[in-house]
Image: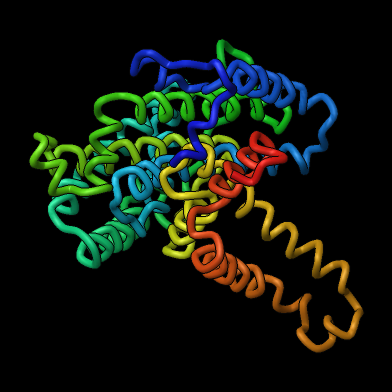
Amino acid sequence: MALTSLRPCGDYRTSYKADQTIFQTRLTLVFVILAIVALCCTPLFASRYVLSLMIQIGYLGIAALGLNILVGFSGQISIGHAVFFGFGGFASAFLADKGVPVPLAIVLAGLWTTVVGLIFGLPAARVKGLYLAIATLAAQFILQDFFVRAEWFTGGTHGAIAAPFTLFGYDLSGDARYFYVVLFFVVVGYIGATNLMRSRDGRALIAVRDHYLSAEMMGVNLTKYRTMAFGISSFYAGIGGALYAHYVGFMSVEGLDILFSIQFLGMIIIGGLGSIMGSLMGTVFMVLLPEATGWLASALSGSVIDQVLHLKDGITYMREMLIGLTIILFLIFEPDGLAHRWRLIKAYWKLYPFSY
């Protein structure tokens, strides 16, 4: 914990408010502003392929942040996050089809998904451990079956068409323009989550995670905050799913399986449980991992390794295998995730050349 509070000499904090600022130093604030400005300039020179990857990182990063609030900050577990992601996409497509403006439909889809998350969160908040995992697994299969049968809402097995994103009559579809839409939601979502963790409710969630008996003795309502964590997690998942639906223009039940939910878990494990920044870092890693696998398979095409392993035919299975292998390796060698490694790197340069 000491590594997170390293500050320059003379930077004194005399109140809790000053100690809980989002940006510990002015230099950090400057770097964040410069990073956002650089991202705003990205569509001017980046290719459509790069922009599509960054958009994918954006909407998956929002959903992964919601799961990290549930798992990393409140100490619960969910292996059905993909269906809440899908529900947000279907809800936004449904509302847009009924004439609701797409920007408003995305927000309403997030709220609608929150209600569904609270419904499943109420019984799940009263159990823990393996029982909680089974309860969230039940939500995965229940909502998957609902997506297939509710043709009025999802289009059934045929899927649903999602209207393009328009704002005040301007069409913002296409990679270069939709990138700014996703960037806006990412910035707002991550700032909102950071502020939540600084509030009383955020500290209560962390207290429930660290020692629920002590938190209950201090007056923290366990059921309330565990259920609230499910609601917040579902809201972020719904927003991410809605952004995905309007980017692709189509929402289908295919792909919303348990493997997708496990990939969300992999994002927060690799990035770092209980870390806002780690949610985005893990998402970047998981999105680029299949791409790197494809590049590696192309580079080894025709080689002895390709002839032995048949990389071209088994590239899909290789990606799934690498995702599982990566999660295992991170759990063994870097259980605190990439965010912790980044803090160690920053601490090294702050303390250099001293070792303490």
Quick check: can you spot residue 255?
A: no
Q: Nearer the viewer, residue 193 or 346?
A: 346
When asked about the image quadrant of residue 174, the answer is top right
**Residue 116 point in image, percent of width and height:** 26, 42
- Asked if residue 117 lies left or right of residue 172, the reply is left
Q: Residue furthest bottom?
A: 308
- Residue shown at 38%/52% (left/top)? 81
Q: Residue furthest top?
A: 168
183 lies above or below 159? above
- Asked if residue 181 lies left or right of residue 142, the reply is right
Q: Quadrant location of the C terminus? A: top right
- Residue shown at 53%/53% (left/top)? 337
352 lies above or below 146? above
When asked about the image quadrant of residue 148, the answer is bottom left
**Residue 114 point in image, percent of width and height:** 29, 36
Quick check: can you spot residue 306?
A: yes
**Residue 6 point in image, percent of width and height:** 53, 31
268 lies above or below 248? below
- Asked if residue 275 lies left or right of residue 135, the reply is right
Q: Nearer the viewer, residue 140 or 187?
A: 187
Q: Quadrant location of the N terminus? A: top left
- Residue shown at 27%/47% (left/top)? 209
- Residue shown at 81%/66% (left/top)? 296
How many numbered badges does the structure rendering display?
Answer: 0
Colour convention: rainbow
323 lies above or below 288? below
Q: Residue furthest right?
A: 302
